[in-house]
Image (tube, rainbow, N blue to C red):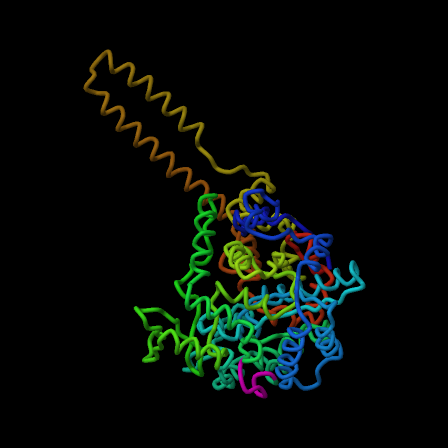
Amino acid sequence: MKVTKIDYAATGAFSKTVADYLCQSEKLQPFYNRFPTLEAFEAQIQEKQFSAAQRQVLYQALQQQYTSVTNISSKVQQNLELLQQPNTYTVTTGHQLNIFTGPLYFIYKIITAINTCIQLQEKYPSYNFVPIYWMATEDHDFAEINHFNLFGKRYDWETAQTGAVGQFTTEGMDKLLAELPEKYSLFEEAYRNSKTLAEATRAITHALFGEYGLVSIDGDDAQLKKALTPVVEQELTEQLSNKLVEEANAQLEELGYKPQIYSREINLFYLKLNLRERIVQEGRKYKVLNTDISYTLEEILQEAKQHPERFSPNVVLRPLYEELVLPNLAYIGGGAEVAYWFQLKKVFEAYKVAFPMLMLRNSALYITRSNASRMHKLGLKPEELFQSYQDLKKHLSSQIHEEEINLEEQRKAVAAAFAEVEKMVQDIDPTLVRAVAAEEQKASNALQMLEKKISKARDNKHEQTFKQLENLKEKLFPGGSLQERYDNLLTYQTNNPDFIPALIEAFDPLEFKFTILEEE
């Protein structure tokens, strides 16, 4: 496997916010705690406070959650036990419960967390480090998770269920499994033998990453939610997070950064089976949108104490919840995730919770052997593939010793000739000036049309070469997007069972470079 690393900025696929963060721009420094380097983790360890009682709650919740997994790997069981120890810390990534793991970047997130823990273990052998996948079980946007793309074809899971997707049964998955081009036993077993989507997703991540010790946690848990109760109470009575996020948004916008998320007056949902709806305050009543449920302040505070599991944080408060229930040092996310964490530092400060280090997940372009062959036949290097199709087309044209068709010099010559004619008629008959201008425009238009025709004729001459280029670009950048945002794990693992080990070997989580992997 040939590995090439390039700067994220060279891909043209990441925001200015990400680029500025990676170069540690002074403008962004007030919005995060410390930049992630191996050396910086020592201070983060010292700052993170996590009591023995908190560890026991976490351990008991995870032990209960893992009863749905048969044959827990020894590495995962070891990590579950280690979480009880005062010298154990976590590195966390989070993602929705996309069926069949969804786009590749879900896999890349988890591998970034695993590799970070490996590097930390080598650097700090007196501590233990556990990679965590935070399952977004409470998310209710089913349309975002109900499909995946395999070998260029989209597959959808159809169900009428509503509410938090983690609570969905796997009803209707049989039909989807029957549509696949072949049987994938790992997924068949997970979806057929699990009661809920949350259980199925844990089974899948355990099968894929159990040997690396990945622990998957479900925040939709009554034991864990007790830690959020004080935040829920303050959110209902003071609406503190909204004020703090709006302050941060204003500061970021003033610096030229667009906020990724927008806060609500109350950043909580009400959660029950088949239901996850926003809580809003209307006068003295707290209402659950699109339902008949309403409470007085006293009633809803009592509800929060008796049933903390019924209160679900939105994107503003979920990161705080994660850090309340985990001995966490760093959060790993995509560009948009890292950017919205910048909006939340004031919230963490208000609750006196250590703000984790923010790590951009590894990103990659995976070039199969067949696509690598096409690339080399076209005379292209891996790092050149991020250029636009038109730029690459010009590049190929120059390689085959044909310059771009451009009649600019001829246009200038024609313009100069008509300028002489205009000067001549000015002295003879000024009324002819408009006629000269009209003829000049006709000539210019004719040259423009000729330029297009000549270009088209030249393109037709090399149509096969350009078609190969177009096909290669579409294979590697489906729909003009990064491969990782479209393709699924099975597209590559089916033909390369060592796909995940190859990624683990290639990714350096603290290098902050885009990785290109080329099969040889």
**Above or below, comparing residue 186 to residue 409 in the picture:** below
Q: Main secondary structure of the magenta part?
A: helix
- At x 42%, y 63%, the residue is 239
Front-most of residues 466 and 306: 306
Q: Is residue 191 magenta?
A: yes
Q: Which of 92 and 49 is in front in this view?
A: 49
Can residue 364 be seen? no
In the image, residue 119 sits, relative to residue 179, either above or below, namely: above
In this rendering, would 391 be left or right of 117? left
Residue 486 image offset from top left, x and y in percent: 53, 64
Residue 342 counted in the magenta span = no
Instruction: Answer left or right for 162 relative to 59.
Output: left
- Image quarter where the N terminus lies is bottom right
Q: Percent x, y for residue 147? A: 49, 73
**283 or 455: nearer the eye?**
283
Q: In which quarter of the image is residue 372?
A: bottom right
> Relative to 467, does residue 298 appear above or below in the rendering?
below
Residue drawn where x is 50% and y is 55% of the image: 343
In percent of the image, x 28 and y 28: which residue is there?
439
Q: Position of residue 413 (x, y in %)?
A: 41, 24
> What is the quadrant of the C terminus in the image?
bottom right
Q: Is residue 298 visible?
A: yes
Specify start and end residues of the magenta stretch as a single range: 190-197
Residue furthest front as drawn: 298
User: Quick one: 8 or 227, which is closer to the camera?
Assistant: 227
Residue 30 pos. (x, y %) = 56, 48
Instruction: Give the tally of numbered discs.
Output: 0
